[in-house]
Image: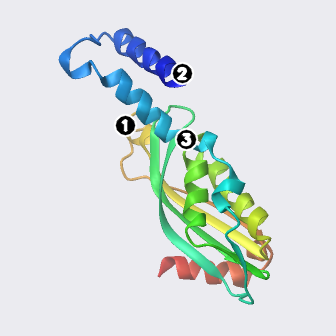
Amino acid sequence: MTSIIVEEHFRAIIEAIGENPDREGLVKTPYRAARAMEFLTQGYEQDLGEIVNEAIFASSNDEMVIVRDIEMYSMCEHHMLPFIGKCHVAYLPAGKVIGLSKIPRIVDMFARRLQIQENLTKQIGESIQQVTEANGVAVVIEAKHLCAMMRGVEKQNSTMITSMMLGRFREDQRTRQELLSLLRT
């Protein structure tokens, strides 16, 4: 039902910019655009508990775990244009670890919402902390924003970096430095 409404709105947008939605190349565009928007915002329909799905395992490891270079695609909530980059997630286990595939899934759940990068970084960090109860969690996101590349300041090579440090990553400079040096390698 929602898709039909979104499809009608895309048709109206095409008309509002002066195009003919019945032109051969645009006939199915409202349908395709609605499906794309549905996919790009599917994070609203996802639940942290369902994503983790009890993939938390007992472990005596208390050394840093890093999943880096997680491809990430999101949509700027101000202009509804994509921002694209990579996310690095680290945590210091406290008796349990999370299944490897769950971290990128958590990143995707929050990235697939209308978002600003600062909030996305925080949401990922707080969620990883919540499900792992780790001694520390760190999230670093590097992204290029099409809202700054295609319009506005039109700066093609600018990258935004945000970080969220919790627990020992925030409190212990040596732990933070170890993480940052590992991310540079």
N-term-proximal mark, 3 vs 2: 2
Q: Secondary structure at mark 3?
A: helix
Residue 3 x, y percent position in the rendering: 49, 25
Is residue 158 left or right of 174 when viewed as pictured? left
Rendered image quadrant of residue 121? bottom right
Amino acid of disc 3:
Gln
Amino acid of disc 1:
Met
Is residue 95 left or right of 115 when viewed as pictured? right
Residue 13 x, y percent position in the rendering: 41, 15
Residue 152 visible from this viewpoint: no
Rendered image quadrant of residue 89? bottom right
N-term-proximal mark, 3 vs 1: 3
Which residue is label 1 attached to?
150
Q: Secondary structure at mark 2?
A: loop
Q: Nearer the viewer, mark 3 or mark 1?
A: 3
Is residue 150 left or right of 66 when viewed as pictured? left
* Residue nearest the viewer, comparing 97 with 146: 97
Q: Secondary structure at mark 1?
A: loop
Whether residues under marks 3 and 1 lie with C-beta atoms below 8 angstroms apart, the answer is: no
Q: Which mark is residue 133?
A: none
**Which corner quadrant holds the N terminus?**
top right
Which residue is label 3 attached to?
42
Residue 33 visible from this viewpoint: yes
Q: Which mark is residue 1?
A: 2
In the image, what residue occupies the spot 66% across and 62% down? Answer: 52
* Residue nearest the viewer, comparing 10 with 158: 10
Amino acid of disc 2:
Met
Q: Nearer the viewer, mark 2 or mark 1?
A: 2
Q: CA distance from mark 3 to mark 1?
A: 25 Å
